[in-house]
Amino acid sequence: MEDYNKIIESLGVRFIKAKNLVLQQPFKVRNYYDVGNNLILLHKGSIFFGDEEQMVEEGELLFIPGGRSTKVTYGSIDGRTISNDDLITNREKFFKSNNDLDLIGDAEDSHSYVSFEAKVFDSVNFFASLDLPAFLISNNNKLANLVIKVVEENMQGLPGKERLINLYTEQIVVEIVRHILKNRMFVEQLATNSTYFKDPRLIDLFNYIKENLGGDLSNKVLSNVANVSEDYVGQYFKMLTGINPQDYIEYQRMERAVFLLRTTKKSIREIGKDVGYKDTAYFCRRFKMMFGIPAGKMRRRESAMNI
């Protein structure tokens, strides 16, 4: 348990967004994907997820780890099937954002959600690193109330709003980890994938990659950082994390690109260069392969409804 305390203490949590949404028409997203972790609380209606279309009951929560693609159905399973690209492009056709505090939990076919980052040593996405699938959280009123608190605070312009939202979001992350441990969920993944956080050389690699996303991150460079041979560094990284270092680097670069798209007015070319891609066309191809939509469309989505 002490190991998990150390991991939790090392987590850097960042709130991204929160909304209360009302379903406009039933639909199924065959490849739902987001960089941020999403915790969804179903108020009324129905949600199904995964290839087996497991049902989320009213009052239950669905947790979808960032970077993990999954099938999600809102409303009837007989609704039209769309891609994640379709959802991003035409979100207003499927959801209406509710800004009335009195309607939270009362509107038909509605849910609330909180999106957030949770990074170990501010370098690696915790839930993504554990390779967890989307999963159901039942009988957890504490988590449900925290989601509602974040949504309500986000709707209002009260003094201290940002501080409370950050505090509640940190509590959400801790409660999700506690729920996983208490219910002995994903025991094998936790035992296998959490051990690498103890290796200082790997932490040095995480930090170096984070600080040098726009530079040379070849295995030769990484081997010098970790003080291991160039031939061994790839095997060493994969042995501890379960992923190839270059795959991890590309994920970090693309995640940074999404952040820049959301928070700056830099051109696609500038953003690609900032995250280590000299060839803009190649950057755009890789971005679309990872997220299912072009970089420009991702920006338009964020600047439009932000839901």
Image (cartoon, rainbow, N blue to C red):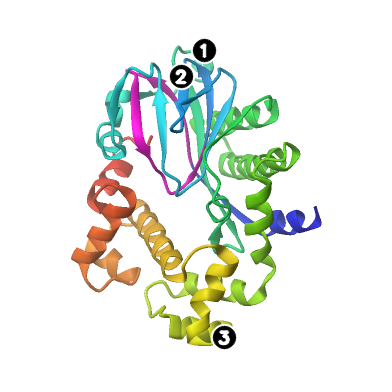
Residue 7 picture quarter: bottom right
Residue type at tag 1: Asp
On whether residue 21 falls in the magenta region, the answer is yes
Please give the range of residues in magenta. 17-38
Q: Which residue is mark 3?
A: 228
Furthest toward the right, the residue is 2
Residue type at tag 3: Val
Does the residue at mark 1 contact the one at mark 2 (Cβ under 8 Å)? yes
Residue 21 picture quarter: top left
Residue 267 in sight here: no
Image position of 302 with respect to 136: above or below: below
Tag 3: Cα neighbours inside 10 Å, few (<14), some, or many (≥20)? some
On whether residue 230 falls in the magenta region, the answer is no
Q: Relative to the observer, which residue lies in front, 303 or 257? A: 257
Q: Which mark is residue 106?
A: 1
Q: Which residue is mark 2?
A: 110
Position in image of residue 3 (x %, y %): 76, 58
Q: Secondary structure at mark 3?
A: loop
Magenta stretch: dominant secondary structure: strand
Tag 1: Cα neighbours inside 10 Å, few (<14), some, or many (≥20)? few
Residue type at tag 2: Ser
Q: Residue at x 38, y 34 (%)?
A: 307
